[in-house]
Image (cartoon, grey):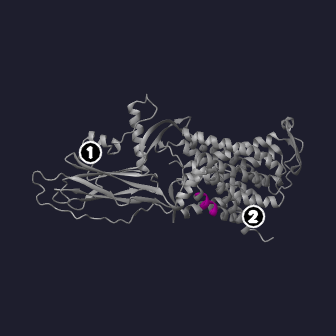
Amino acid sequence: MTLYLPIAEMSVSVIAFLALGATVGFLSGLFGVGGGFLLAPLLTFLGIPPGVAVATSTSHVAASSVSGAMTQYRRGNVDIKLASVMLAGGIAGSYVGVAFVKMLTARGLFELTVSLTYVIFLGVVGTIILIEGINSSRKTRTAGSASVRKPGQHGWMEHLPFKMRFPRSKLYISAVPPVVIGMFVGFISAIMGIGGGFVMIPAMIYLLRVPTVLVIGTSLFQIVFVSATATVLHAVENKSVDIVLATILILGGVFGAQFGTMAGEKIRGEHLRVLLGALILLVAARMAVDLAIKPGDLFSLASTPGAS
Amino acid sequence: MRRFLSAVIVLMFAMTSNALAEAPGRPKENVEADASTRQVAITSSFTGTEILVFGTVENSVQPSPEAGTYDIIVVVEGQPAPAVVREKSRVAGIWINTTSMQFAVVPSYYAIASTRPIDEIADKAFLDTHQIGFDHIRMEPSGAGEADTDAIETFRQALIRLKEQQRVYVKRDFGVTFIGRSLFRSTIALPPNVPVGPLTARVYLLKEGKLLGQYESRVSLRREGIERFIHNFAISQPLAYGLTTVVLAAAAGLAAAFAFRKPA
């Protein structure tokens, strides 16, 4: 069964894209990540124009993070105030990101930028996760790991203005770092078509020193809104969101995610992190190779999604 | 990517065959043609289609379909649109788009079929005038005044090659066949990625390199039904469209979470 996509302007196999959505959903459920970093490159690989791939994948991130955010919220693991402050930055960041995408597309640099940001971010993050996963699975029996949080040790951040109290996280910090982190995550989220959890979670743990129990929920909560904003902005600015493609991917994705979550509960956390790190590095390596290898055809036609 | 032939009824006009046609002062030949489908609808099940262009040579003196007395060229062209071609080169170890050329107007779709290769049918001047054949389409780079002709030619050839790869530029050298002394037909493939917009079908009748007649008709190619609705929605009300996508995504995510919720 094939369907004609109204924005991508091509005919695709529904089964193939349902399967893609389910696979990415399964992995995102398994690892507890948004899965955007896999979806956008895979969509491009299957012939979806890069602009449409990134924009549509942000809507998939919104769908896959909303259920997780809901669960975390019910458990009281969301610091709404901190999330809102980060979100303010996030929305501004995604607005800049979407405008940046528009500008890069006009100059023929969009694909390159996406590939480069993927290689850099996924390379760094994948390496960190992999190393950390390997280390912790080695010393898994020597338990009693010290808490990461060392209250009152924010160093230079102590001196920043606009101090705010975040009672839920038991923090009294300047509003500047959360806003900046949110802005940065919103920016890369719009460019890469991802949620940005893999940047936000370490930033919250190591820079803001948010209690670990609140990190996942707060980050998911903010990802829902940032990806929703990015979707709307891509639709308005670049006319590159394909609702039919989004629906197919989301249908596959939400089911895949549920099974992924179940499977994830059966695997040890450290092993999951090793697998996730390896997967992320694989995607980064694949894109790095594509950048370095001489393309079969040096010439390309600019694609203008949604125009006509 | 299966293409299927759209249901086609070819109406054959009874041809008055005049035995004295070859006598001096016989009526001049001309061509009448049409496309099988005046309207091609792009719906959610669109996977490309074919249109049949058919016609007759009036006052044909061709003794048999195989005689090759006449040459027919069929050109089906999409809306003119600007096109940007980019060229990559290696910068610091990675391949980057470094140079580009914008062509002000090129046909978004161009299909050509003929009874034999076009350069055997007519001379360059004729082909240039009527823009018949990929190499004879007028393509002017916009803006760049100083671009040298070599560069223009390189980019132009790249444009044609890429459009051919996308199957939106199609050429069939023996794609027009006579099925009678005067009746001819040709099928033109519209790929799934055909640019949406009206198409123009032009038919040229030639004999020994001389134009005897030409005919033009239009084929509309437009979105229909839900495709039309969604596309219009996305273009005319992008904010509402984006919000709808988000609501849909959120609803699907919440529904799945609810459906799979562990019995607490």
Q: Which residues are magenta?
A: A245-252
The numbered mark 2 sits on a residue in which chain? Answer: A
Q: Is residue A255 left or right of residue A14?
A: right
Neighbours of disc 1 within 10 Å: few (<14), some (14-19), many (20+): few
For residue B91, which quarter of the picture? top right
Query: Residue A301: which disc?
Result: none
The residue carrying pointer 2 sits among few (fewer than 14), some (14 to 19) or many (20 or more) residues within 10 Å by Cα, namely few
Does the magenta segment cover residue A1? no
* Callout 2–callout 1 Cβ contact below 8 Å: no
Q: Which residue is mark 1?
A: B119
Q: Main secondary structure of the magenta part?
A: helix
Q: Quadrant of the N terminus of chain B?
A: bottom left
Q: Amino acid at mark 1?
A: Asp
Q: Is residue A29 above or below residue A201?
A: below
Q: Looking at numbered disc 2 in the image, what kind of residue is underneath it? A: Glu
Element type at mark 2: loop
Please name the residue shown 58% across and 58% down the image: A245
Q: Nearer the viewer, residue B259 or A41?
A: B259
Q: Position of residue A180 (x, y in %)?
A: 76, 40
Residue A250: within the magenta? yes
Residue A288 drawn at (x, y percent): 59, 44
On the rendered structure, is A226 left or right of B159?
right
Read off the chain for label 1. Answer: B
- Say if labels 2 and 1 share a chain: no
Q: Secondary structure at mark 1?
A: helix
State how far apart marks 2 and 1 are (Cα). Answer: 69 Å
Q: Is residue B218 visible?
A: yes
Of badges 2 and 1, the one in the foreground is 1
- Residue with the mark numbered 2: A265
Q: Position of residue A212 (x, y in %)?
A: 83, 52
